[in-house]
Image (cartoon, helix red, strand yellow):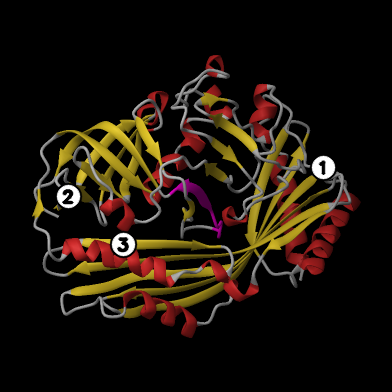
């Protein structure tokens, strides 16, 4: 199949050259499988195979794109798509800068992160995995819901500027399991990310749910008073907060447009806690990496923050063209963000619950309904949900109703950061809308941030 894809892109480039066109091609193919559970039963079991082709035409400093759903056997339809894109560019408004056309110095093929056993795992195996996790945990009132999503993702690119091309193929899975009480309306959740089949771990997922259920079924819930709390965030919450840094922190183009809380003047300065280091690391297979970007730049570990010091912005090719910067190899469907682990030894929820506490600690594994409040100050807002716990100083545990946090990333990863767990895990941040783009972020399993203020506290679930 790899040869067929590259052959087809080559034929389309040859066709364009014969017509005197200047184009680039972006090919995306996905095999997606989804099993969904609701009310302790399978509510949906589906799959789809899609091929998308995005054609970009260039004429001087003018550029347009035309996208189509297609098939490798429909070469003539794809040629018609090229003709449409080229006709469109004639009527496009000129850009204020000269856009770069991708040029590949060599053919780059990377299928090292594709595991066919994971991509095509059977329905029977998915169901068996769920049953291993939740066996004996459901009741008449506690019902199962969740998803098991898996598949294969192929991205390829070519242009009339080069006889070479690139192709990257990965496999991925995302498992989300929720147990919800139909009468009391609480929910607990456990999630897992996998790049190869051996990554799947039903035992770990079950242990997390058992620990949460033990408290949600036996401990009385309460509304938390407003005020400041020492908060331990779980991997999901950490990853979702870091996900926003792609937009309002390290993106050079958005910085130039005024949407970042970081500025060029802060490069080389200590902006965050010395316990905070973040990189874009395409060597981590768990992130479904691109080791070469869509303009042919080979990618290597790229430091964004090192021991609190802000090291670099990322520059997509188009932003670099517009603002006269050097591209950094970040024109990829997603980054491979990795936050370094720390020195605190706590590798599971059970270990966290058993640790002695000098003060009350609020544990928030997930943040939901997150959004940006003020990009120039790095302020986000989000609500706790799915398994928050208040770990009392005396060793007892209280189940809190949902609370809302509105905080700056400068505080969350700044001097208020008390400790970071030693062990890191991948957390899957893939979206189920649009073209398949498997994404995960490597984060510490836990981190504690002290003195964070709760802006709202619910009086019920």
Task: Identify which residue is drawn at 67% across, 42% down.
Answer: 64
Q: Quadrant of residue 457?
A: top left
440 in the magenta segment: yes
Which of these two is toward me, 185 or 340?
340
Q: Is residue 425 left or right of residue 454?
A: right
> Which residue matches tag 2?
395
314 in the magenta segment: no
Residue count near mark 2 (Cα–Cα under 10 Å), binned few <14, some 14–19, many ≥20: some
Rendering coords of residue 304 (x, y %): 57, 32
Looking at marks 1 and 3 on the same chain, the residue that comes earlier in the sequence is marked by 1
Q: Which residues are magenta?
A: 435-444
Rendering coords of residue 78 (x, y %): 74, 61
Task: Identify which residue is drawn at 25% across, 45% down.
Answer: 356
Which of these two is toward me, 46 or 15?
46
Q: Is residue 250 above or below residue 127?
A: above
Do we see residue 95 in this rendering? no
Q: Is residue 222 left or right of residue 364?
A: left
Where disc 1 sits, the SS reads: loop
Task: Identify which residue is drawn at 85% across, 58% down.
Answer: 10
Task: Identify which residue is drawn at 91% across, 52% down.
Answer: 18
> Which residue matches tag 1?
103
State the CA–CA distance, disc 2 to disc 3: 23 Å
Name the residue furthest top. Answer: 265
Is the C terminus in the top left, top right, bottom left or bottom right quadrant?
bottom left
Q: Is residue 317 above or below residue 204?
A: above
Residue 189 badge: 3
């Amino acid at each position: 199949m790899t040869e067929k894809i590259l052959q087809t892109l080559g034929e389309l480039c040859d066709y364009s050259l014969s017509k005197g066109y200047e184009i680039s091609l972006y090919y995306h193919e996905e095999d997606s499988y989804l099993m969904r559970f609701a009310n302790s039963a399978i509510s949906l079991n589906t799959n789809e195979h899609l091929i998308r082709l995005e054609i970009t035409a260039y004429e001087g400093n003018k550029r347009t794109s035309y996208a189509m759903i297609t098939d490798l056997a429909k070469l003539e339809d794809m040629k018609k798509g090229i003709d449409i894109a080229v006709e469109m560019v004639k009527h496009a408004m000129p850009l204020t800068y000269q856009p770069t056309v991708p040029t590949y110095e060599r053919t780059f093929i990377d299928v090292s992160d594709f595991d066919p056993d994971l991509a095509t795992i059977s329905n029977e195996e998915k169901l068996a995995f769920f049953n291993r996790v939740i066996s004996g945990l459901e009741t008449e009132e506690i019902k199962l819901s969740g998803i098991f999503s898996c598949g294969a993702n192929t991205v390829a690119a070519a242009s009339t500027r080069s006889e070479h091309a690139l192709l990257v193929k990965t496999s991925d899975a995302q498992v989300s399991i929720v147990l919800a009480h139909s009468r009391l309306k609480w929910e607990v959740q456990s999630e897992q990310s996998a790049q190869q089949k051996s990554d799947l771990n039903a035992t770990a997922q079950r242990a997390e749910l058992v620990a949460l259920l033990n408290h949600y079924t036996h401990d009385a819930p309460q509304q938390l008073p407003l005020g400041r709390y020492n908060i331990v965030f779980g991997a999901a919450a950490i990853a979702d907060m870091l996900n926003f840094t792609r937009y309002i922190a390290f993106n050079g183009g958005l910085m130039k447009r005024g949407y970042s809380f970081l500025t060029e003047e802060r490069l080389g300065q200590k902006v965050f806690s010395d316990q905070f280091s973040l990189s874009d690391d395409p060597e981590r297979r768990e992130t479904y990496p691109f080791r070469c970007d869509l303009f042919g730049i080979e990618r290597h570990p790229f430091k964004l923050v090192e021991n609190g010091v802000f090291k670099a912005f990322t520059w997509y090719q188009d932003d670099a063209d517009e603002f006269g910067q050097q591209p950094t190899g970040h024109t990829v469907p997603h980054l491979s963000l990795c936050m370094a682990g720390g020195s605190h030894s706590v590798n599971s929820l059970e270990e966290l619950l058993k640790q002695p506490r000098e003060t009350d600690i609020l544990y928030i594994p997930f943040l939901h309904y997150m959004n940006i409040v003020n990009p120039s100050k790095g302020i986000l807002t989000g609500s706790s949900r799915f398994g928050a716990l208040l770990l009392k100083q005396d060793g007892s545990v209280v189940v809190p109703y949902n609370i809302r946090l509105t905080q700056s990333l400068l505080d969350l990863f700044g001097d208020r950061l008390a400790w970071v767990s030693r062990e890191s895990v991948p957390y899957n941040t893939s979206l189920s809308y649009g073209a398949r783009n498997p994404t995960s972020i490597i984060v510490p399993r836990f981190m504690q941030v002290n003195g964070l203020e709760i802006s709202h506290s619910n009086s019920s679930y």
